[in-house]
Amino acid sequence: MSFTIFATAIISAMLINNVILSQFLGICPFLGVSKKSSAAIGMSAAVLFVMVISSAVTYTLYDLVLYQYGIPYISTIAFILVIASLVQFVEMFIKKTSKSLYKSLGIYLPLITTNCAILGVSEGNITNIWTETMPYWEGLFIAVSTAVGTGLGFGLIIFAFSSIREKLDASNVPAAWKGVPISLVVAGIMSLAFLGLAGII
Amino acid sequence: MLVPIIVIGTLVLVYVGTYALNKKVPIPEECRDLTDAATCTACHNFTCSYKK
């Protein structure tokens, strides 16, 4: 049962409701950090890492504090502060504990504070998953599963996009289309392609 | 009225604390040249510790 929930949440968040191509969140790193596939992999790993932790923390904060004290209207500002603090903490922790991990993730961690996909997933968990009657652990499990799927979906798209951009750099593109214009056309075609996956689940 | 102020105040303090702690921790020696390798132009994040 729990595996089914986990698998459904992951496939749904990764392919059907893809955070970039269907929800149009995280466009900033999608265009800004997709020039090289190595940078895209680093960014994806950092996003996945922070997305999962922030989803768990924000869901817990909402369920145990904001809802209990009748102040759910401050959820957005509270989530922003949680994500910003978490990014600082994770960066500090990685700096101290793992130099190799810091080498691959470190530079991309501060960017995550301004990544709206992280906030979007946290808000989405509350809007789409959280209910008054749902047990805390069950909701937390679905929220974390959704975050894993969303992070993987983000990684899949940004890596595919960066690979296409690398190929485009070596292609004979008309001068007026070089750079961002052709990249946006590619993004549009990818979005249409992903539309075909709607209805799988 | 007091509860939201306390919650937001606490979160702001947590953020300031983690920011100050993170600034105190030095970047490892072998990771100092990461800025040039990343060539990130995606954001204007004022908390980014890599900005020169």
Image (spheres, rainbow, N blue to C red):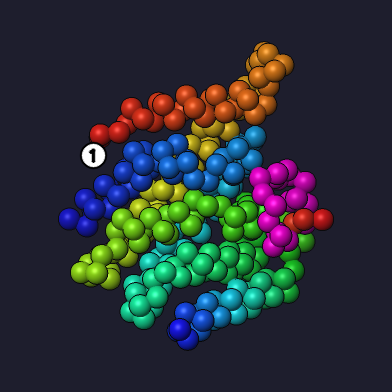
Name the spot of residue A25 as percent of width and height, x first. Answer: 49, 45
Q: Quadrant of the N terminus of chain A?
A: bottom left
Q: Quadrant of the C terminus of chain A?
A: top left
Q: Residue at x 32, y 43 (%)?
A: A11
Residue A87 appears in the rendering? yes
Name the spot of residue B29 as percent of width and height, x first. Answer: 77, 61
- Examine the rendered structure and indicate whether residue A32 appears above or below residue B49: above
**Quick one: A114 or A171, which is closer to the camera?**
A114
Name the spot of residue A190 as percent of width and height, x first. Answer: 46, 28
SS category of the residue bearing label 1 = loop
- Residue sitting farthest toward the left: A1
Type of residue at label 1? Ile
- Examine the rendered structure and indicate whether residue A38 appears above or below residue A135: above
Q: Residue at x 41, y 59 (%)?
A: A123
Main secondary structure of the magenta stretch: loop
Chain bearing tag 1 is A
Quarter of the image holding residue A165?
top right
Q: Residue at x 53, y 64 (%)?
A: A80
* Mark 1, residue position: A201
- Examine the rendered structure and indicate whether residue A187 appears above or below residue B34: above
Q: Residue at x 49, y 70 (%)?
A: A78
| Magenta-highlighted residues | B32-49
- Check residue B50 for magenta coloring: no
Residue A166 appears in the rendering? no
- Check residue B43 for magenta coloring: yes
- Residue sitting farthest toward the front: B1
